[in-house]
Image (spheres, rainbow, N blue to C red):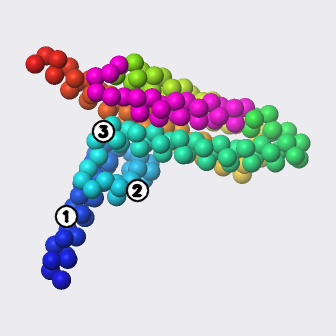
Amino acid sequence: MLTLAWAEQPTVHRRSRARAFIELQCETTLYPNECVRSLSYYASNFTYTLSHQQLAQIALKVALVRAESTRAYVIDVAKELKRTKGKDYQAVEECLSQINDGVDQLKNCIEETQKIKKDEDFTWHASNVQTWMSTALTDSSMCIDGVSARAIRGRTKALIKAKVLNLHQVTSNALALFNRFASRYRSSHDKKNKV
């Protein structure tokens, strides 16, 4: 019995280290509570801890999943408004177009981070990711602004805004975590070159 308890203890300790790492890195984001909430689920997948690159990649995947679920909701709203000839259809269609673009940008980011290898055009890949993520953030902001400016029915407007705002937050956090990884990568690479 004592042996079993002893055997389980390191696993709990290792998982808590991964969680602690996530919490520490999330402090550098604009939305730290959402950052911890959306990423801590993944801590249990790592037996010891995460690297900055792994955390940035996970954050990007979380942003993409959120973008796809937001898009699915807005598609349903747009279909309903089109069916009922709702006057708010145009605003929702514009928002959907921006979310679609954001989904594409996030997919590009994930593909680009998978191309990042040691010392192989890091600056090029990192710049692409940062540009595409910034575009995805702009898309979500434009959707929120467009929906806010229209007299869409209260509950529909509130739900769209809440979902897109959450998407904006996780995307912002993913960009912050990627920037932190990129900065650390460049710093360590510069030190190696000076040696």
**Of label 1 and label 2, which has the lower sequence position?**
1
The three-letter amino acid code for the residue at tag 2 is: Tyr
User: Is residue 147 toward the left or the right of residue 7 in the image?
Assistant: right
Asked which secondary structure carries label 1, the reply is helix
The extreme top residue here reads: 194
Residue stretch rendered in magenta on the structure: 94-121
- Residue 192 against residue 41 in the figure, above or below: above
- Residue 24 against residue 47 in the figure, above or below: above
Crowd tier of the residue under label 1, counting other residues whose Cα lies within 10 Å: few below 14, some 14–19, many 20 or above: few
**Of label 3 and label 1, which has the lower sequence position?**
1
Q: Is residue 107 magenta?
A: yes
**Residue depicted at x 39% and y 53%:** 42
Q: Position of residue 120 (x, y in %)?
A: 32, 21
User: Is residue 28 toward the left or the right of residue 151 in the image?
Assistant: left
Residue under label 2, please give it: 41
Can residue 158 be seen at all in this image of the molecule? no
Q: Position of residue 12 (x, y in %)?
A: 25, 64
The extreme bottom residue here reads: 1
